Image (cartoon, rainbow, N blue to C red):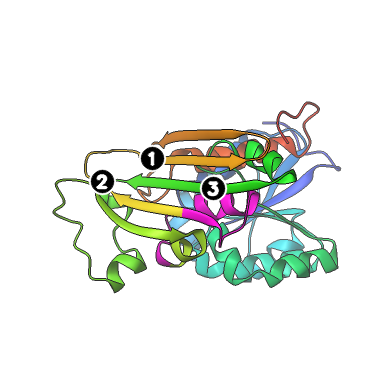
Amino acid sequence: MRAAKPNDLRVAIAGLGSIGTKIATALDQGIEGLTLSAVAVRDPAKHQAFLNSLRSPLQVLPIEQLGEAADIVVECAPSRHLRSIVEPAVKRGKATVVVSVGALLDNSDLIDLARANGGRIIVPTGALIGLDAVNAAAIGTIHSVKMVTRKPIDGLKGAPFIVANNIDIDNLREPLKLFEGTAREAAKGFPANLNVAVALSLAGVGPDRTMVQIWADPTVTRNVHRIEVEADSARFSMGIENIPSENPKTGLITALSVIALLRKQRATLCIGT
């Protein structure tokens, strides 16, 4: 464990689920220039054993107070808590790393609030590769962006779109296309599944021009994403098969992406935009 230094950036984490615990562990083990200062959890007693296992002392605070104890607040809680985490932090001019990026579409005023107060909202690459290329292409003109997602059955259960349309996916024997539409519509119907689509849309042509297909696929064991981009600078396609974490709705690489982003905050050498 690296001893904390006075000029370290303090990092607080909202939520200690499958993503938050991995980020907390990485920070506790040591990331140059950063120190874990606080966490917020709904039931501290449930996480006491994990908290006791950490080598550095930290505060357990209500989510709205994390910005007081940190320079960077990492949101990895259920999407309904996004505003409660981000708003007080950016009002204080702090940075927030947002995992539940789909919820930003219904809270876009937070971007203006951050701008007015010197705060920042940072969206990690998450479960999607190639956002650097999309960001670069968006400096020019992107003509179209399409994403096709295939997920195992367990990763889609309980999605509002499936419940509202009374779709039975439990007994599927072959792939079923559940949805085709914009990234904005996908985020509403599949809020725990399609953060990747919203991140893609924000990097490129926006949530109303990014087209998405979602398939329930009993033949796959990974979260599969295929992206096709047509731009004036390049035509490219990307594919990734993410291994689900302990939470089947979330890919294992999501937490690793946040850790990689945090490592870049004070890194001497940074790769990628």
In the picture, residue 84 is in which quadrant? bottom right
The type of residue carrying mark 2 is Asp
> Which mark's residue is nearer the viewer, 3 or 1?
3
As rendered, which of 139 and 260 lies closer to the eye? 139
N-term-proximal mark, 1 vs 2: 2
In the picture, residue 89 is in which quadrant? bottom right
As rendered, which of 272 and 40 lies closer to the eye? 272
Q: What residue is pinned by disc 2? A: 217
N-term-proximal mark, 3 vs 1: 3
> Which mark's residue is nearer the viewer, 2 or 3?
3
Left or right for 161, reference 107? left
N-term-proximal mark, 2 vs 3: 3
CA–CA distance in space, label 3 to label 1: 17 Å
The type of residue carrying mark 1 is Val
As rendered, which of 208 and 272 lies closer to the eye? 208
Residue 183 placement (x, y as % from top left):
50, 59
Find numbered disc 1 in the image and state the secondary structure of the residue it sits on. strand
Find numbered disc 3 in the image and state the secondary structure of the residue it sits on. strand
How crowded is the residue under tag 2: few (<14 C-alpha within 10 Å), some, or many (20+)? many
As rendered, which of 163 and 77 lies closer to the eye? 163
Residue pictured at 17% horizontal, 56% vertical:
170
Q: What residue is pinned by disc 3? A: 145
The type of residue carrying mark 3 is Val
Q: What residue is pinned by disc 1? A: 224
CA–CA distance in space, label 2 to label 3: 22 Å
Left or right for 152, reference 209? left
Q: Which residues are magenta?
A: 189-211
Residue pictured at 67% horizontal, 33% vertical:
30
Task: Judge whether 227 appears above or below 32 on screen.
Answer: below
